[in-house]
Image (spheres, rainbow, N blue to C red):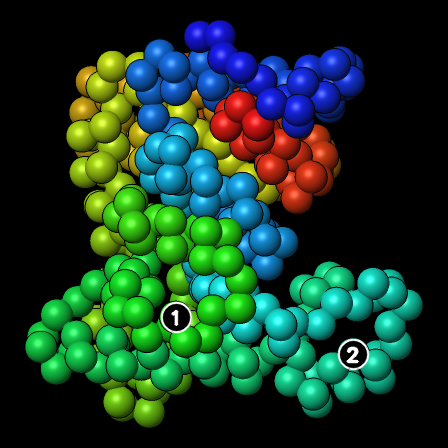
Amino acid sequence: MSKTRGPISQFIERNYLHFNAAALVDAAKGYEAHLDAGGKMLISLAGAMSTAELGISLAEMIRQDKVAIISCTGANLEEDVMNLVAHSHYKRVPNYRDLSPQEEWDLLENHYNRVTDTCIPEEEAFRRLQSHLEKVWRNAEERGERYFPHEFLYQVVRSGELEQYYEIDPKNSWILAAAEKNIPIVVPGWEDSTTGNIFTSYVIKGELKASTVKSGIEYMVYLTEWYRANSGGKGVGFFQIGGGIAGDFPICVVPMMYQDLEWHDVPFWAYFCQISDSTTSYGSYSGAVPNEKITWGKLDVNTPKYIVESDATIVAPLIFAWVLGQ
């Protein structure tokens, strides 16, 4: 489908002709073709993409129905909202490579947790969000209700209670966009996040029950039901940013249904792209080339496959810009 291209897309098409640049264009065109044919797309977020402010481009992708479901780490789930409510308190450290152990300790003492060149302010970000999450956790438990981690966060942002803290344009928060669309989010290994740790502390203190937050197994069941309902026609594509659990967990739903449930009418993922800078030869999931996934029953021989071996903070916004016609 031809469309008018904006200046970013025109620049990409003119200049990105070889190597990883060309792979970026191929992946973007494949993403667009998949959607134009009626397909749906899952995006997985590993790394610290929310702290990298991917929401600036991802939120618009969500609003324009270019993504149907998201799988992300607990860190990416919470850090988009932390940036929303505490942006002015973040601290940039451009010379992070030169920091001594003592300077790192000084950041800790001043309640700054560093992610490469960006420090997240503990009091304004973690603790500000904590009080509102604690409220919805306790309310659910009192009513005998249980929810997924993303559903609790949806409750918080939909309540409007965080609006008093907003420090960026809310259109740049992908969580707000996702909550408005009510798109499903899968958060494997949520316990590994700061808010997961905070919830665990309440469980250890006997103030909340572990069962109040639904588990990873329940997330896999939830994803299974979603995939069965949405994989008809052109099918569901898989756009993977980084590697790790955010990608491996959801992509496994297909071989789980086919091999373990022995449902033989399960379509493979219909498109696959991974942005990664991980080296292939070390046995890591992040570094695995797409063809390896054929042997695990995740991708078909004919599934369009792309890998862009580069920095996702650079590549993902450009691919999104292309898909959005910017």
The mark lying in front, picked from 1 and 2, is 1
N-terminal label among 1 and 2: 2
How many marks do you count on the picture?
A: 2
- Mark 2 surroundings within 10 Å by alpha-carbon count, few (fewer than 14), some (14 through 19), many (20 or more): some
Query: Do we see residue 283 in this rendering?
Result: no
Quadrant location of the N terminus in the rendered image: top left
The residue at the point 84 percent across, 84 percent down is: 102
Between 154 and 6, the one lying in front of the other is 6
Q: Is residue 99 above or below residue 252?
A: below
Quadrant location of the C terminus in the rendered image: top right
* Residue type highlighted by circle 1: Glu
Between 306 and 84, the one lying in front of the other is 84
Q: Is residue 105 left or right of residue 275?
A: right
Instruction: Give the labeled residue for mark 1.
Output: 163
| Secondary element type, mark 1 | helix
Between 248 and 259, the one lying in front of the other is 248
* Residue type highlighted by circle 2: Glu
Residue 85: x and y in percent read 49, 71
Between 20 and 94, the one lying in front of the other is 94
Quarter-of-image position of residue 321: top right
Mark 1–mark 2 distance (CA, rounded to whole Å): 32 Å
* Tag of residue 196: none
| Secondary element type, mark 2 | helix
- Mark 1 surroundings within 10 Å by alpha-carbon count, few (fewer than 14), some (14 through 19), many (20 or more): few
Instruction: Give the labeled residue for mark 2.
Output: 104
Mark 1 in CB contact with mark 2 (< 8 angstroms): no
